[in-house]
Image (tube, rainbow, N blue to C red):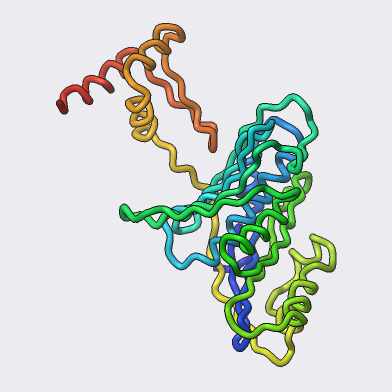
């Protein structure tokens, strides 16, 4: 798969240094996520950043069924979440309940950042949790320092107005890597404009960071927007809510409407559908 053909993730590493990294572009996924989004402009920026951050983090996971990166607070930004499933499907959404157009992460009360790794096959989930920092970039770097205990560098390159969402990531691995070498590597990605870094060819500039050390680029992985909502999942959710609550909604609204927060697909159930749904459950007892 060519990294020029759409959304992608590509990892790389240096042969004789405990240092690895990744780059990604998620422009298409980003465009789908913010389609019709209401809220302050900063909300679009944050959705792009959390998509990019999650894509880059996924390069550190060998096996997983689902990765979930989310920020939550008791303030206007109640939830900011991105998910990736094995195979490269991604989705994201934000739950915004504010009236103030100003979105200051530092001012959000009880703000947390969490990464959940779901390995599937009934295995336990792993979740790391830290306090949200002033920016999502700072939060991701703090997560690696505190929860992973392996220093990492992120540069999230997002411009909602231009529809650009991509970035670079570096992680220091166990082994001998001097502070100067780490500074050289991170400093290389810290300079230049967002556009120039996104357009640069990694096979050309990565060898320039450590000219005497070989660097390897892995094959790029295709990424895409993918939502896991379905009629079956909606029905399971309604059964979990309980027949009484669903019947009350039906009585007031004349139907039950469920809208997926990720893809905005609308699921409608009438009185016949609801009766059949709970009749199936009763027949099992």
Q: Given the current orientation, which residue lies at the most extreme top position? A: 251
Task: Give percent across and percent down for residue 269.
Answer: 38, 19
Task: Give percent across and percent down for residue 261.
Answer: 54, 33
Task: Give percent across and percent down for residue 239.
Answer: 32, 26
Quarter of the view holding residue 155: bottom right
Residue located at (50% from left, 57% from top): 88
Relative horizontal placement of residue 162, taking residue 49 as reference (left or right): right
Q: Is residue 233 visible?
A: yes
Front residue of 74 and 228: 74
Residue located at (42% from left, 21% from top): 268
Quarter of the view holding residue 267: top left
What is the quadrant of the C terminus in the image? top left
Front residue of 176 and 202: 176
Front residue of 158 and 7: 158
Is residue 244 depicted above or below 136 in this figure? above
Task: Give percent across and percent down for residue 36.
Answer: 66, 32
Residue located at (60% from left, 58% from top): 7
Relative horizontal placement of residue 123, taking residue 73 as reference (left or right): left
What is the quadrant of the N terminus in the image? bottom right
Q: Given the current orientation, which residue lies at the most extreme right position? A: 192
Residue located at (39% from left, 30% from top): 234
Q: Is residue 89 visible?
A: no
């Amino acid at each position: 798969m060519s990294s020029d053909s759409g959304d992608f993730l590509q990892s790389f590493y240096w042969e004789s240094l405990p240092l690895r990294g990744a780059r990604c572009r998620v422009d298409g996924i980003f465009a789908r996520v913010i389609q019709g989004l209401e809220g302050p402009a900063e909300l679009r920026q944050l959705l792009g950043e959390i998509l990019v951050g999650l894509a880059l983090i996924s390069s550190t996971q060998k096996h997983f069924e689902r990765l979930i990166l989310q920020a939550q607070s008791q303030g206007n930004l109640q939830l900011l979440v991105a998910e990736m499933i094995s195979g490269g499907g991604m989705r994201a959404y934000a739950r915004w309940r504010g009236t103030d157009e100003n979105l200051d992460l530092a001012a959000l009360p009880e703000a947390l950042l969490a990464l959940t790794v779901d390995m599937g096959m009934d295995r336990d989930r792993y979740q790391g949790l830290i306090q949200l920092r002033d920016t999502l970039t700072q939060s991701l770097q703090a997560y690696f320092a505190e929860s992973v205990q392996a220093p990492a560098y992120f540069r999230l390159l997002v411009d909602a107005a231009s529809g650009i969402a991509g970035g670079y990531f570096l992680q220091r691995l166990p082994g001998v890597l001097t502070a100067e070498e780490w500074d050289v590597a991170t400093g290389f990605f810290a300079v230049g404009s967002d556009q120039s870094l996104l357009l640069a060819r990694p096979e050309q500039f990565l060898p320039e960071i450590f000219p005497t050390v070989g660097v390897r680029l892995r094959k790029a992985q295709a990424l895409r927007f993918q939502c896991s909502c379905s009629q079956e999942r909606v029905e399971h959710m309604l059964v979990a809510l309980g027949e009484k609550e669903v019947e009350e909604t039906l009585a007031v609204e004349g139907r039950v409407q469920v809208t997926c927060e990720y893809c905005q697909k609308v699921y409608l159930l009438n009185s016949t559908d609801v009766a059949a749904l709970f009749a199936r459950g009763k027949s099992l007892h």
